[in-house]
Image: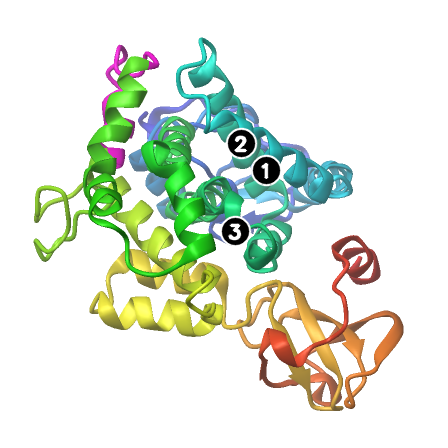
Amino acid sequence: MDLSSATTGPPPTAMPTLIPLQRVAARLRVGAALPFNVRDARGGLLLPRGQTVADEAMRERLLAQGVGIDADELREVQTRIDSQRAAVESGFFERWLRLQGRLRTLLGEPAAPDFLKRLRDCAAVIASLAETSPDRLIFSVMRHEHSRHYENYGSAHALHVAGLCALLARRAGWSADRLHNLLGAALSMNLSIVELQGQMAVRGGIPSAAQRRSIERHPEDSVALLRQAGLGFAIDDEEWLTAVAQHHEDESGGGYPHRLQNPSEMAQMLRFVDIFLAKHAGRADRNPVPPQQAARDLYMASAGHPVAAMLIKEMGIFPPGSFVRLACGEMAVVVRRGAHASMPLVCAIATAQGEPLAAPRRRDTAQPEFAITGSLADKAVKVPVEAERLYAAAA
């Protein structure tokens, strides 16, 4: 679309206060409708609210042309979004638990007639939760107790990979269609070994020869199951199928099953998130790795791959769900990422001696007495973490 030739409406009688569009760049999503009117330097209407951002080129032109939005309108939009988000966030953890249960059943039934529809429905829910409640999503992934439910490791891992991939795709500005293909691939990439993943997590140890064969061929076996379920009739399906087929391929040529050196972008995103979460989750014979270390190890092993770097930026230094020590001595849990990576919003849950507080207490880590002095291992905190109470206290 040629923005220079767009019909320009008459300027308003009073010059509005304009906010540069660059300041709200995150709101410009390819394939999504504009949530506000875009105005030229004189305040005249350039693009109306509801206009779709057709492609990345259009998004870049909008950001480069120095256009803006009315400050009063932005406040109205923000108020509406905050209200909608509050309504959604209030039920986040209940929806997340229901989604876990749905996936546990769904991934064990790839031959069901409505398998693909139900899978797409789950992907749509994940996309919605990532859009409205990214910090709660990360919190749920980081605080998931795999050790209590190792037998469900496969379905939980699929949900977690999809959730973090949704956040990375948003950060990268992927279109809605591409996002849903990515989430479909994340949920189905281990379709042929979901049960085996649970068995390996429970028992640990070296896989048997038969288990090793299943693992080595699971990308292609999962693609075969998806094709049997009906995926592949639309052209867009091929990106999903390719990502599943290549999600263990490495650009160095050391991956499997075909040692490709040019795996797709989507496959690489799946691979990096898969590795990060596998490290963080642990299993019966392997302790979980703290998220900061898992992300750092991934970045170093990949020689600074852009996707690994994006993952570190998205999670932050202290991801929601992390335990930290404050300058006052209190033990706290991170509930929301902040404007500065080292200053997230936290809730104190225990005294310096580890005694539980009567109720979680919101702490601003930008204040010297509540500054974060370091991370705490999960085993160092003996206080139960109740997500709903934490986020109620942080509101």
Q: CA distance from mark 3 to mark 1?
A: 14 Å
Type of amino acid under label 3: Tyr
Q: Earlier in the sequence, mark 3 or mark 1?
A: 1
Residue under numbered circle 3 = 150
Residue under numbered circle 1 = 100
Taking the magenta stretch, the answer to whether it contains residue 35 is: no
Q: Earlier in the sequence, mark 3 or mark 2?
A: 2
Return the residue nearer the eye: 164 or 246: 246
Taking the magenta stretch, the answer to whether it contains residue 231 is: yes
Return the residue nearer the eye: 390 or 40: 390
Type of amino acid under label 1: Gln
**Quarter of the rendering containing residue 347:** bottom right
Q: Is residue 79 left or right of residue 275?
A: right
Q: Quadrant of the N terminus?
A: top left
Type of amino acid under label 2: Leu
Task: Residue at 10% x, 56% y: name it.
Answer: 254
In the rendering, which numbered label is found on residue 103? 2
> Residue 54, relative to residue 361: is it above or below?
above
Query: Could you tell me how many numbered marks the image carries?
Result: 3
Q: Residue 301: give x, y in percent of width and height.
A: 23, 69
Asked if residue 231 can be seen in this view, the reply is yes
10 Å crowding of disc 2: few (<14), some (14-19), many (20+):
many
> Residue 375, relative to residue 143: is it above or below?
below
Asked if marks 2 and 1 touch (Cβ < 8 Å), the reply is yes
Q: CA distance from mark 3 to mark 2?
A: 15 Å
* Extent of the magenta region: 229-244
10 Å crowding of disc 1: few (<14), some (14-19), many (20+):
some
Task: Residue at 25% x, 26% y: name it.
Answer: 223
Task: Residue at 34% x, 40% y: name it.
Answer: 61
Q: Secondary structure at mark 1?
A: helix
Mark whose residue sits in front, 3 or 1: 3
